[in-house]
Image: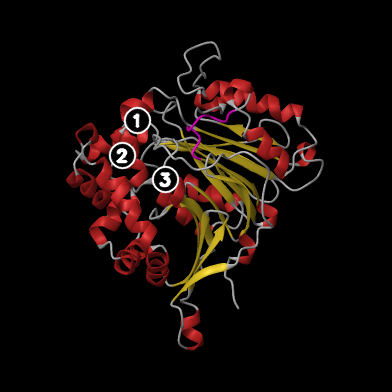
Amino acid sequence: MVNKLLLLAMAVVLCAVPCSCGNGGGEATGSGVQAPVASYPEQPEGATDVLAEGRLYKAGKINVLVLQGTYEQMGRQYGALLKQELNENYRGMVEGLQDIEDLSIEDLQELGESVYEKYPQKYKEIINGLAETSGLGLEKAKALNMQEMYVSAALVNWAQTQGMQCSGMAAWGPYTSGGPLVFGRNYDLGFFNAQYATMTVYNPIDGSIPVASFTFAGCIYVTSGMNGAGVFLELNNGSTSDCSDFMDTRPWAPIDLFSFLEGASDLEQLSYFFETTRPDLAYIVNAADADSACSFEWATSGVKKRLPDQEGLLVATNHFVDPSWDIPPPGVNAPDVDFSVQRRVNLLTLGEENKGAFDPEVMMEVISTALEDGGAFRAPNLTSYEIVAVPAELTVWVRVPEYQDWVEIDLGRYFSWRE
């Protein structure tokens, strides 16, 4: 059952759970500076223990969780600071799905265990610490970690009718008139769990590069993230171009991406990690640093590093584009179930229309342009969240449609922070 569940989950996309919160339009808000709303432990003892203090901030409605210490300590901080959210999320997302599409709670627990057992030990320690201080216990924490896969598997039939995937776009050089590189990302996996959207900043004391990951409360991995060296990456589904079966002997790719960001100081170093690692399924990982961007078309058999479409412009959706694959992309007028070709064509066109003008505000407008209006945004309730990143400034803006308008988060002040 686990292999079947994994295949269903990763071959399709996540679905939506309705929310009655406010709209997601409007301009970017905030200065990127947030005040802490909680810390754990509340009164650390001694200078050494200060390194083990975590803090919770709010960027609008978005959790910004800043952790520091050993991996176990960061897990304990995570569980204590988001205890209520984690328990509510488990009840709503795990127990609430157990009877859909013939899934049981035992199936979900088995899947959580199957993925957890392939995690490197240090990331297991985060889940272990979270399990203890949240009160969830380890079995539930393992299950909650895989919440996105549960949703996609539980609602596979609905998801397959929506054609939801992801889009990424980077502009720099002549497209920003010499301004800093700006990256835009749409995470098109359905509108769900908006109230648990969380930016988690990990500051380990083992020498690894700090990493910020934007996911949902309880998810310990990276599908969208930036590190303290200014390397940004985001994950898209690539199974359209590589239909190989799920490789259940390999770790889940998003945990590999966590490890990659902890070790890569630039795109060249990141490339080495992709060259030596094979994923469990096919993905497209778009990455950028302060100077340039590229797309890693990451098949189960190998990887190709695709260079920009134009000098200063990179666009990627959900099919491999590098000609050396010898895989002809479907034509725009041919069956294009998830609109991968159309979204790519639209973003390339918007890139040319805005050449020389790209900055964070322009990128927000471009990636928020609806598919029907010549963009890539999937509305209503299909795009889960959007991110605009400027790696050179360690700054991101996030938007959760129909829940939180664009809000700025200055990650630089949270990487390895000290009082």
Residue 343: image location, x then y, percent: 57, 25
Mark 2: give few (<14), some (14-19) or many (20+) Cα within 10 Å.
Answer: some
Mark 2 or 3, nearer chain start? 3
Q: Amino acid at mark 2?
A: Met
Q: Amino acid at mark 3?
A: Asn
Residue 57 shown left or right of residue 125 in the figure: right
Q: Secondary structure at mark 1?
A: loop
- Numbered range of the magenta stretch: 376-384
Location of the C terminus (image quadrant): bottom right
Q: Are marks 1 and 2 in contact (CB under 8 Å)?
A: yes
Which residue corresponds to mark 3? 193
Which residue corresponds to mark 2? 247
Mark 3: give few (<14), some (14-19) or many (20+) Cα within 10 Å.
Answer: many
Q: Nearer the viewer, residue 62 or 129?
A: 62
Residue 38: image location, x then y, percent: 49, 70
Which residue corresponds to mark 1? 244
